[in-house]
Amino acid sequence: MVLRAWSDARRSWRQGHAPALLVIPLALIVTVCVVDVLSPPHVHLGPLLVAAPAITVAFAGARTTAVMGALAVAAQVLIGVLRGVSDTTNLQAQIAALIVVSAVCVTVCVLRGRRERQLLQVRSVAEAAQRVLLRPLPVRAGPLRIAGLYIPAEQEAELGGDLYAAARTDHHSTRLLIGDVRGSGLGAISNTALLLGAFRAAAHRQATLPRLAVHLDAAFRWDTSQWRPQTEQDTVEDFATAMLLDIPDHDPVVHLISCGHPPPLVLRGDRIVPLVAEASHLPIGFGGAFGIADYRVQTFPFEAGDLLLLYTDGVIEARDTDGRFYPFTERAPRWTADDPEHLLRHLQDDLLAHVAGHLDDDAAVVAIRRLAPGTPPPDPAP
């Protein structure tokens, strides 16, 4: 994401400043022509004209680079005519070398443009896959204001092993899932899609939260092992830490089941309250294997004005260049008064600044604020 933003900014800067930057190679051509013509016979500055197309290739396209190369060649010919050396082998060699360098610069521009178009197509496909798989969270769900943040660790990646999702039930509550699938790469993305699909298929039903946890564990274990040889069943470990939550509309509490996931935080005024589960269950994918048939639900206060933060270990385990972990519990209360969207923007900037723009693991955060009764819906996003 960081590299993508930098690439976009660089492209935008190049497009906006290219006309002004053309003055540099043009001024170089004019200066070399004037100085070379006025210099003594033994001084030859014509070879410096090769810098004109070489400079242009840094900020312009193939056509502009070709034009600048043609101007440089014309300037070299003009110098030869004015100095009376147009028929010498030395000047002809300089012109030939200038033509070759200009052609190479144009070729570089063409290849670079083709590469950028390919990257744009790949990015478009990745963004479409992300919107399908990791759908944006609803801005408003009953009395809740919700926002989600996902920062992939791999540069230019759109999706990794972290996930979140939300669903409304018929009995006026909102259910949420946040999780972290083991591993990385395509395997983690496949398991992420599996877990999200199982949650969306069952979360809106009237099943209790423990039954939902049993369903996710069974679906995850079945799908990740159904085609695996029996000899590999005990050697390959596919699992996901997860937190399941159910937040009723008319009861100021939050019900949760922790499956090996970091505890949520409640920001209440200037205080931060970790919702530490008394008994955290095994991660999703291990429950059925160890005979767990039921999950314990724990209930915590979640009143109007409170802000609930769900996160993955990529946030709290992010290290700076000195190896210090990101002080999540210290930084988060700074933005308690902000809307969830603004809080996550501040958090993203602060987190990336802490790690100097490079995360070692994917990071996901979900911010949920319980609004007071009668609070109007938010304005539509621009």
Image (cartoon, rainbow, N blue to C red):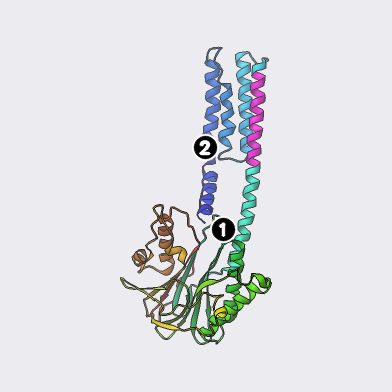
Q: Residue 118: x percent and y percent?
A: 65, 51
- Determine crowd level at label 1: few under 14, some 14-19, many 20+ residues with C-alpha closer than 10 A: some
Tag 2 secondary structure: helix
Q: Earlier in the sequence, mark 1 or mark 2?
A: 2
Q: Which mark is residue 157?
A: 1
- The quarter holding residue 249 reads bottom left
Residue 127 position (above or below residue 198): above
Residue at 67 percent of width and 74 percent of height = 226
* Residue 300 seen anywhere in this rendered image of the structure: yes
Specify the segment rendered in magenta: 91-110
Kindly identify the amino acid type of the residue bearing the numbered disc 1: Ala
- Describe residue 148's horizontal placement relative to residue 273 as left or right: right
Identify residue for label 2: 21
Q: Nearer the viewer, residue 7 or 152?
A: 152
Kindly identify the amino acid type of the residue bearing the numbered disc 2: Leu
Say whether residue 99 is magenta: yes
Magenta span main SS: helix
Residue 331 position (above or below residue 15): below
Q: Which mark is residue 262?
A: none
Q: Residue 3: x percent and y percent?
A: 52, 52
Say whether residue 112 is magenta: no
- Residues marked 1 and 2 touching at CB (< 8 Å): no
Residue at 54 percent of width and 31 percent of height = 25
Q: Nearer the viewer, residue 171 or 164?
A: 164
